[in-house]
Image (spheres, rainbow, N blue to C red):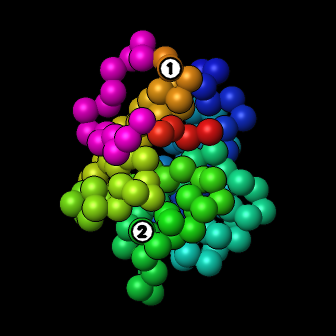
Amino acid sequence: MDDVRVKKVLLIVEDQLLLAMGLKDELEDCGYRVLELAIRNQEAMGLALEVKPDLALVNIELAQGDDGVALAADLKALGVPVLFISGQPERARLAKAVGIASIPKPYTPSEVVAAVDYLFRHEHGDESRPKPSRLEMFDATSPS
């Protein structure tokens, strides 16, 4: 198991349940601890307050009109960095004040794992592997 993954806790906020479950399974198979899936802002904030994740993967457009950008701002206030996983890359770029990076849909679970791995390595100054081509970094801030 990769050292960067040990004990890292992730939160996935995605209203497309099949996509979220596949992503959760892939991340767990790679050694990450993934909290219960959230599809609404309120669920995500409850989980984040209970167990502060090291990184949240957030879709921008959520169920019942919930807004992933507003959620990202709330998570940032808690000290939780956000990787946007969205089919709206332009909107993700506009939200760079509250997110650290974005990966556009459609993506494969392995692309997301590579992006998450890169973000944690980048945090520790490890540039031994190249940035995944579909990962857009917003600034030098990394997850904790």
- Residue 65 vs residue 106, the one in the foreground: 65
Q: Secondary structure at mark 2?
A: helix
- Residue 19 vs residue 58, the one in the foreground: 58
Neighbour tally class for label 1: few under 14, some 14-19, many 20 plus, Cα within 10 Å: few
- Image position of 79 with respect to 70: above or below: above
Q: Secondary structure at mark 1?
A: loop
53 lies left or right of 40:
right
In space, the residues marked 2 and 1 are separated at their CA atoms by 27 Å
Residue 10, position as x, y percentages in the image: 61, 48
Q: Which residues are magenta?
A: 127-140
Pointer 2 or 1: first along the chain: 2
Rendering quarter of residue 90 = bottom left
Name the residue rendered at 55%, 40% in the picture.
Answer: 143
41 lies left or right of 87:
right
Residue behind mark 2: 69
Is residue 12 in view from this perspective? yes
Residue 63: mark in rendering: none
Residue 130, position as x, y percentages in the image: 33, 20
Disc 1 residue type (three-letter): Gly
Residue 125: mark in rendering: 1
